[in-house]
Amino acid sequence: MEKLTYPLLCFQLNEEAVLGILVGTEYQLVETSPQRLRSTLTDHLAKIYKKEGDYPLLELEEPTLKIVETNFRPTYRIGNGAFPLTNKVKLEQPLVYGEAEPGVYECFLPLLDESFYCYDLGQLDSLARHFISNALDEKKPRGNLPPDLLPYPITRNSDTESKGRQLFQLYLEH
């Protein structure tokens, strides 16, 4: 029996609500705790498996969370014109990555619904900043809730040394 593992990115929205994003899939959910998120998502994916006979494909070895900081200049676009704002905005975006196959890292920017591959971890930050800038450049400045307004992601260990390192994970047996 094969064991599938999915990284679960969690944000504590308020005392009673935790947003969970099942990285690499289209699934997002709000529940009362990370444990309830895992339980609800596990039940939902089991129902999908019974109906469709398969789970969403995601193969990441040791998924890791990293917060990438970038400076971005929002730009309004009207027709063929582009009107950049005067000041840059500092953004912090969560990046989840893991080895998909030897030497190939699959990377996700879950709040921007973007993904990319990285072949050299030394270039990970610059690649992430590039994809963050491109994704934000295509959005209207007031079009969506700015992703930087979400709180810092919560992780399995709450101490500051491991903050941003150990994602919650969802395990399924297939």
Image (tube, grey):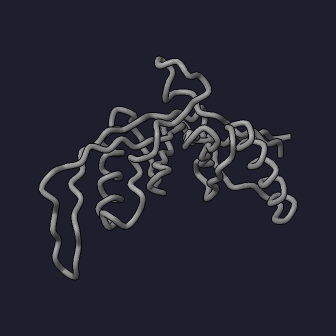
The percent coordinates of residue 113 (x first, y second) are 48, 57
The percent coordinates of residue 79 (x first, y second) are 22, 82
Q: Is residue 96 rendered to the left or right of residue 45?
A: left
To which quarter of the image does residue 146 belong? bottom left
Q: Nearer the viewer, residue 17 or 155?
A: 17
Q: Check the picture and name the quadrant holding the N terminus.
A: top right
- Rendered position, 62 above or below 157: below
Taking the spot 38% from the left edge, 46% from the top edge, the residue there is 148
The percent coordinates of residue 78 (x first, y second) are 22, 78
- Rendered position, 91 above or below 157: below
Q: Nearer the viewer, residue 167 or 99?
A: 167
Taking the spot 47% from the left edge, 52% from the top edge, the residue there is 111
Taking the spot 35% from the left edge, 52% from the top edge, the residue there is 131
Q: Is residue 148 rendered to the left or right of residue 79?
A: right
Q: Is residue 142 rendered to the left or right of residue 101?
A: left
Please state the total of marks drawn on the protein image. 0
To which quarter of the image does residue 51 belong? bottom right
To which quarter of the image does residue 35 belong? top right
The percent coordinates of residue 98 (x first, y second) are 53, 37
Q: Residue furthest left?
A: 86
Q: Is residue 54 rendered to the left or right of residue 5?
A: right
Q: Residue furthest bottom?
A: 79
Taking the spot 62% from the left edge, 54% from the top edge, the residue there is 28
